[in-house]
Image: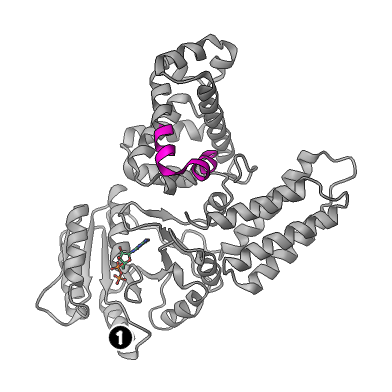
Amino acid sequence: MVLADLGKRINGAVNNALSNTSDDYAVNVDTMLKAIVTALLESDVNIALVSRLRNNIKSKLMAQKPASGSTNAQTKKLIQKTVFDELCNLVDCDVKEPFNPKKKQCNVIMFVGLQGSGKTTSCTKLAVYYQKRGFKVGLVCADTFRAGAFDQLKQNAIKARIPFYGSYTETDPVQVADEGIKKFKKEKFEIIIVDTSGRHRQEEALFQEMIEISHVVKPNQTIMVLDASIGQAAEQQSKAFKDSSDFGAIILTKMDGHAKGGGAISAVAATHTPIIFIGTGEHVHDFEKFSPKSFVSKLLGIGDIESLMEQIQTVSNEEDTKAVMENIQQGKFTLLDFKKQMQTIMKMGPLSNIAQMIPGMSNMMNQVGEDEASSKMKRMIYVLDSMTKEELDSDGRIFIEQPSRMIRVAKGSGTSVFEIEGILMQQRMFASMAQSAKAGGAGAGGMPGAG
Ligand code: GDP
């Protein structure tokens, strides 16, 4: 799971600071910072950034030192919020919404990156992402350098039902790119994604070819694909590419396996180019929109309703999503919304990728693993299936007011009252996230289910 260990360690440090090992606030803050700094450095985060984060947290916490009569809960909120904000700053590069393609216009996106970074895979993932959002999308393979590149793109495109263009005979990538773009433009495609040949290293001739393709393609957006497992080398690599292709955004791939992801993220943030998506596996849906707040929420096990909704939009039917979104915008989240989410989540592939976005779920995954978590989710659906319409449309309080309903549902679903209480608690966590999303601060309000 992405950087799960780092998240756990940071949470551990924060919770230790809160358990008042010393009566001295400053000592507790220092002990916590020491643990956070060690965890970040061991995850390969850039040392200068870690040192800045440490100083910022310390000065903020000392400046707002809780008054002697403050409650533990107030201190807890202050420390959690400060750590959350500074972790966000660490991975943020301050560029807002880098690229926003418009419908009924032609938007050309060109991909660059080293061979093996996950470029071709990410092209298809991005194509699917936009297609699911109603764009007419085409893929062009301008990689004539690597044998088999066109076949790979073709296979991915066919599987994902995305129209594609490429050539087995033409050896000039500039020519192929030009033809592909002309064809798709003529057919009024709204997004054309061009895959270029991967460089083995930063070779002069190949960089020159990239510049030539770029002159013909005239991309509205150039995206560099970076393999997260290269850690801090990401900064140097992105600088080298920036000099020749001036990309405006980054997709960081292979975030599913490597602790070094921390290094790549912080290194990239230092180049002031936004990471717009992260790849979290080989499957086409293993692709998440990146935003610093969402990332840190997941890292800390807070749950992340923004990303969850993003993901759900890619796999669920439009009507269901619309209904849930409307409720969330009003700060509501009923048991029926909860049921729809659970059903969609079960369709979304590896549970571990999704679990981090849901409050309380990352805890469960850590404790029981994928198979058991999946069977627990099935039981949740049985429980929700046994509820009446009135119950599903409620915010769950009906069960607290009339506990006999819980006994009925437990009997009907072959589960226990204890399990039902657990589900109601999770739905309440969702509902409070919906409230904070409505207030404009998803994730920043606290750390329910941290771990
Ligand atoms: P390219 O040479 O840059 O076009 O790279 P490919 O798209 O062919 O990907 C290289 C390998 O990385 C393939 O085996 C992909 O399945 C794999 N890959 C791509 N993205 C991801 C990712 O996000 N996670 C994981 N685990 N593997 C990935």
Q: Quadrant of ligand 1?
A: bottom left
Q: Position of residue 303 (x, y in %)?
A: 54, 44
Q: Position of residue 264 (x, y in %)?
A: 50, 69
Tell me the SS state at disc 1: helix
Answer yes or no: is residue 271 visible: yes
Does 254 sit left or right of 48 as displayed? left
Q: Residue furthest left?
A: 169
Amino acid type at mark 1:
Leu
**Relative height, residue 270 to residue 3 (above, below):** below
Q: Position of residue 362 (x, y in %)?
A: 52, 44
Tell which of 345 and 132 is nearer to you: 345
Magenta-colored segment: predominant secondary structure: helix
Does 23 sit left or right of 127 as displayed? right
Q: Position of residue 276 (x, y in %)?
A: 44, 61
Q: Residue at x 32, y 53 (%)?
A: 129
Answer yes or no: is residue 60 visible: no
Does 68 sit left or right of 38 as displayed? right
Q: Residue at x 27, y 54 (%)?
A: 104
Tell which of 363 and 116 is nearer to you: 363
The residue stretch that appears in magenta: 359-377
Does the magenta run of residues contain 370? yes
Does the magenta run of residues contain 246? no
- Tell me where residue 42 sits by quadrant: bottom right
Q: Which residue is mark 1?
A: 206
Q: How many marks?
A: 1
